[in-house]
Image: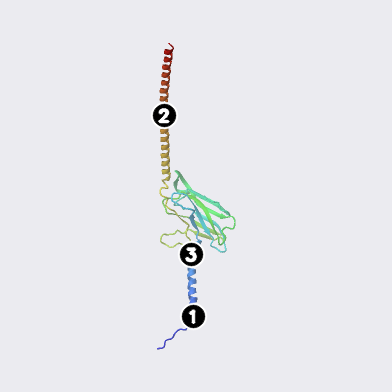
Amino acid sequence: MKVTQATPAATATRTSSKLPRVAAAGAAAALVVLAVSTPAFAHVTVQPEGEAAKGGYAVVDFKVPNERDDASTTKLEVSLPADHPLASVMPQPVDGWDVKVTTSKLAKPITSHGQKIDEAVSKVTWTATGKGIRPGYFQKFPLSVGQLPEDTDQLVFKALQTYSNKEVVRWIEVQKEGQEEPQNPAPSLTLSDAAEGSHGSTAKGASAADSSAEDAKSTAAESTDSSDTTARVLGVVGIVVGAAGVAYGVLAGRRRSGAGA
């Protein structure tokens, strides 16, 4: 039986013929990864500076990347959640942008800090006074918001991004649990649970303060009672000493009188 052995040249030829296919497959995989990751980067998102705890206040940043190569972002409109209205919404000035705050009547009034509120901010609009967000850049738009609701785990803010070529991208699709992320997801703010005892901290603090005040009063009262007792004792001692002095003086006078006689 004759055995044919491959020569090094033949092996090299077959290996080199596979390289283009391997390279093509690798390039295709890289393009798929890039295609999947790029849109996520280009989303309009909202993130807290620090923590956004239920029942508290927070500063949140709307991050707006420019995803066009031939146009700038010139306008951002953010609608606040109507199902969980926020009593306090204050924008931070952003250089190169005008800001407009729109308020609307509430279908159902809310109570904040003991006050009944029948209207709240429904939309905040930033409009560029210059070139806006140029291609390859992003901009943050901060808002101070509160009091954050305690009956939900997240707040959804629908946003409209307008470009200098008049194109409008509507970031309004709500992410549904168990489903893939939509093409134009609405910015969503995740709320953390309030720190344990945070809502009762004021009451606890007040109780501690009241206790301290009562202790101080008690100490002051004890100090006053002690002072009064000391004063009474000293007064009695003074009277006794005075009486003894008088008696001694009388006796001494009698002795002198008897000696003179």
**Residue 125 spot, x, y in % from top left:** 53, 53
Are the residues at dot 1 and dot 3 in contact (C-beta closer than 8 Å)? no
Q: Residue type at mark 2: give it.
A: Thr
Q: Residue type at mark 3: give it.
A: Ser
Distance (Cα) linking label 3 and label 2:
83 Å
SS for callout 2: helix
Q: Along the polypeptide, which appears first: circle 1 or circle 3?
A: 1
Where 194 sits versus 221, above or below?
Answer: below
**Residue 104 visible (yes or no):** no
Name the residue located 51 percent from the left edge and 55 percent from the top edge: 62
Q: Where is residue 217, by image quadrant?
A: top left
Name the residue located 40 percent from the left edge and 27 percent from the top edge: 233
Are the residues at dot 1 and dot 2 in contact (C-beta closer than 8 Å)? no
SS for callout 1: helix
Between 11 and 19, the one nearer to me in the picture: 11
Name the residue located 41 percent from the left edge and 17 percent from the top edge: 251
SS for callout 3: helix
Q: Which residue is mark 2?
A: 230
Q: Along the polypeptide, which appears first: circle 3 or circle 2?
A: 3
Residue 105's label in the rendered image is none
Residue 37's label in the rendered image is 3
**Residue 203 spot, x, y in % from top left:** 41, 43
Distance (Cα) linking label 1 and label 2:
111 Å
Q: Where is residue 136, by image quadrant?
A: bottom right
Q: Which residue is mark 1?
A: 12
Where 223 sits versus 36, above or below?
Answer: above
**Residue 178 spot, x, y in % from top left:** 40, 61
